Image (tube, rainbow, N blue to C red):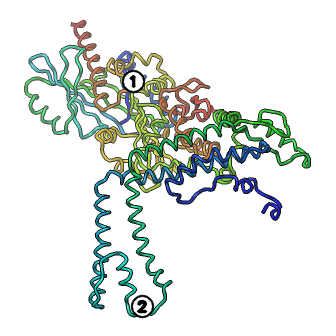
Amino acid sequence: MPITYVFKISIAIDQIPQFRETLEKRIQALKPRQLNQFQVQAVVFQATNQTAIHQYLHSDYSSTCFSLIEPSTPQQEIKVLTGDIGLASLQRRILDGEKKALQLDLIGSAFKLGDFQIKIGTITQNSSNRGLLVEISYCASNNNDAYGVIIEFVESHLGLSNSYEMLSNYVKRKAPTANYTPEDTIIQYYDHFNSLRSQTSQLRSQIN
Amino acid sequence: MAANVPIVNPAQRMAPNMMPVQTQPPYSQQSQAQHQTPASTQQQTNPPVDPDQKKIQDMFEAINLIANLKEDINTILENVGKANSANNYSQLLSSQKQILEANLDSIKSSQATNQTSSVGTPASVSNAYSQNPSVNAQNEPEQNNLNEPNEKQVNLNEEEADFFEKTDNKFMNSKIGDINKSLVELEKIFKDLQPVTILFPFQGSTTIQPWQADFYSVLLEQTFEEKTTVTSSKMINNYRYLTKLQENCNLTNLTSYKRFQQSYAEKKYPKYKSYNNRLMKKEEMEKTVSALLGNPDIKVVAAQKTEHQFVLDIIMPQNFKFVFLLFDLNVERLQVRPMDSRILKIYTSNKPSDEICFYDFDYKNKSNVFQRLEENCLFAWVFFKTEFGINHISNLLKWIKNFKDLFNAKCSRCEKHLLNGIPPTWRDLKTYEPYHDECRIF
């Protein structure tokens, strides 16, 4: 499996569509091979005892469903449950009636440039922009050792200077020789979505 | 005799003066002769003789004494076992009985043929033989001839009777005393002997060549002389010195010295050790390759397809592997491939390597990095094969070992990871520094 890093670009909500266009232009100047649209869907089921169940669907892994339980403390390890696509429908049927589920969608364009795969997408909640994410995967390596290569690619081709801060804490903590699995991408998405949710809740509390 | 023969050997000339070596002497005579030997020599060597001749005479005396001693010892050894054994008596008695029975039978037969009365004495037995009708007509000397075997039998009986006297302890002790005396005499003679004089073959007539002079001076530790006296101990010491020199030369590993000691056969048929150390099993292959790499993180798996053909996988920690097609440690083909995490699990579960290790001839790498790396490996393989010949695999493995930081290393020239989307896939052939393909200098 290729190693992937998900970068969250901290930018004002108004400037998101403009900035996304500029990024796409920069990559298309290198004449990449354009891939199909990619999509990530996250559904959060809030239970009565404050522990939430997250469900993730990724277009790269079309026939699998990832689900994880929110840890009570941030230091606890996150464990992801991988299952068939039937698991997603089951979860929705059971937990639909209790409370209205929170849904986040990420839709964007994908390119291939050499050994790199670049995906740029915006997070939407109820058809309103929330944030901008860039996912970069390096096909040759399966190892966390290729961190430097990806960082350099981001800095040189996308023109993003402070790339280290854009990464999630999970990647920063990972050992350099650890092998990469698709669950790692899901955890990165979970981290970024969580931070966005907290931001929105803070904003709402400030307004109210 | 001396006048007829012009050249007389001193040994032959002295022979009549010496005591003759007796063949199978009786014991009583032998002991007397041994006592007489010193007296006889003293009497006969009264006139002045040359010192050389005297020495030779002494030597012959010693040889004679030794011959006598040998015979004595042999007889003692033969008789010692027989002396005290009861079986010996019974054997002798039985033999005597047989003789008597034979006599009686002959008498009976004679009585049956000729009805004449005769007395059972040995003399009558002889008459009985002579009384045959055919023999009676013949003359007396023929009768004597017929009597001879009977006389011999009588002699044998007498000898056997003497045997018991001789095997007594007193007699044996006296014999041993005689032997000791003669041994003491021998020692005296050997002490009187002087060192041997060496006469060189090239006395005066032949010119002394330089190499001969050198050789003898080394051996005898002296400058060349016509006559030199050398004891055996000096000779041995000199010989030992020469052998020690040779041993030290062998220990030094100096080829210039060794070359002179090599025989012709060794030069003609030199040994090629690389051919002899052929690896027969895949376990040996794995061991040697892992020893050459010297890194515990790098896994080595081998599979033996035929007697000579191997497929060797070198799995790097970065989840890619080098695949070699080998023919007795000669690299035939080379490939770089990415690894799946699933295949890694198979390796860890100890499946037989013949199922996993295989060489795809129609495989093309999807990623640019490995495609470029494979090409570079082929370049390096060609270089090492031309440089080092048969033993190129060790150098190739040393070079390949440096790709453990393929995605982590920066180019030593441009100091960047990426160039055209590819990390540095070239290592210098001698310094092992990472370079991009475009950055390296040929």
- Number of marks in the rendered image: 2
Residue marked by disc 2: B136
Residue B442 visible to the viewer: no
**Where is residue B441 drawn, in percent x and y?**
66, 33
Q: Residues within 10 Å of mark 1 (few under 14, many from 20)?
A: few
Which of the image's four quarters has the N terminus of chain B?
Answer: bottom right
The chain to which mark 2 is attached is B
Query: Quarter of the image holding residue A167?
Result: top left
Q: CA distance from mark 1 to mark 2?
A: 132 Å
Q: Tell whether B270 sits left or right of A121.
A: right
User: Residue B418: x percent and y percent?
Assistant: 53, 29
Amino acid of disc 1: Pro
Label number found at residue B223: none
Residue that appears at 42% across and 27% down:
A145
Of residues A15 and B364, the one drawn nearer to the viewer in this rendering: B364
Residue B252 occupies quadrant? top right
Q: Which corner quadrant holds the C terminus of chain B?
A: top right
Q: Position of residue B195 (x, y in %)?
A: 73, 38
What secondary structure is found at the residue carrying circle 2? Answer: helix
What type is the residue that disc 2 sits on?
Asn
Query: In this picture, is A15 found above or below B273?
Result: above
Foreground mark, 1 or 2? Answer: 2
Which residue bears the numbered disc 1?
A: A176
Given residues B401 and B97, the one toward you in this image is B97
**Label 1 element class:** loop
Q: Position of residue B275 (x, y in %)?
A: 55, 50
* Front-most of residues B376 and B51: B51
